[in-house]
Image (cartoon, grey):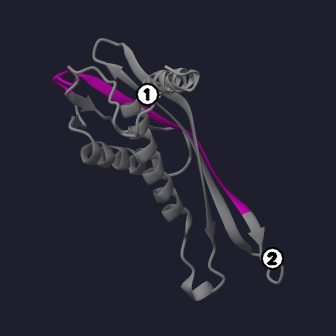
Amino acid sequence: MTAFQVARRTVLAGIAVLLLVTAGCGYHTGGQAIRLPTDLHTLYVPTFINGTSIYRIEQTITEDVIRELHDRTHYRVVTTNADGAADATLNGTVTSAIIVPMTYDPATGRISSGMVAVSMKASLVTSKGKVLWENPNYVYREQYQVSRDAPSFFEEEEPALGRIAKSFAKTLVSDILEAY
């Protein structure tokens, strides 16, 4: 065997070892690694707590979270747990919500755009009290435009809150399933 063949085999062996090492690095595609206990079948999702002055924001967010859990998981989702049959409880709190003007129309001095910012926290706890997952610091922002035409004025804060609720629900369910 020539020196060239030996060098070639050494390089090929090195490449093979490198491929084997990097193949087991632990990366996976999103939505594939469900790390919750296998004996978890029923989730109790009570209405989230509203720690803000925004009317019904907790109901909108809870409804979107329940819808997302139904759409993306195999868990039975219940909104009452009087019999204590749920395996785990998903608790949530809307900790703050602010609506602020962003820009003003220089001609009229009226608001031309605004922003809604919402902070939330959530946790998934077993019926025995073990915390399976939690995130105390979700923050979402949504900018919106205010109509300049007074007769066609439409309150845009509520649709912006709805978009935040949908985005939060998608992120929350992904975070729980991926256990990040």
Q: Which segment is the magenta one? A: 81-101
Note whether residue 58 is visible: no
Q: Is residue 54 above or below residue 148?
A: above
Viewer-side label of 2, 1: 1
* Amino acid identity at mark 1: Ala
* Amino acid identity at mark 2: Gly
Measuring 20% from the left and 38% from the top, which residue is drawn there? 74
Measuring 55% from the left and 85% from the top, which residue is drawn there? 152
Q: Mostly what secondary structure, the magenta segment?
A: strand
Residue 108 location (% of width, % of height): 79, 82
Q: Is residue 95 above or below residue 36?
A: below
98 relative to 13 in the view: left or right: right
Q: Which mark is residue 114?
A: none
Residue 155 location (% of width, % of height): 55, 71
Q: Which residue is mark 2?
A: 109
In which quarter of the view is residue 128 placed?
A: top left
Q: Secondary structure at mark 2?
A: loop
Residue 141 location (% of width, % of height): 61, 52
Q: Which residue is mark 1?
A: 23
In the rendered image, the residue lying farthest to the front is 1
33 relative to 118 in the view: left or right: left
Q: Is residue 139 above or below residue 107?
A: above
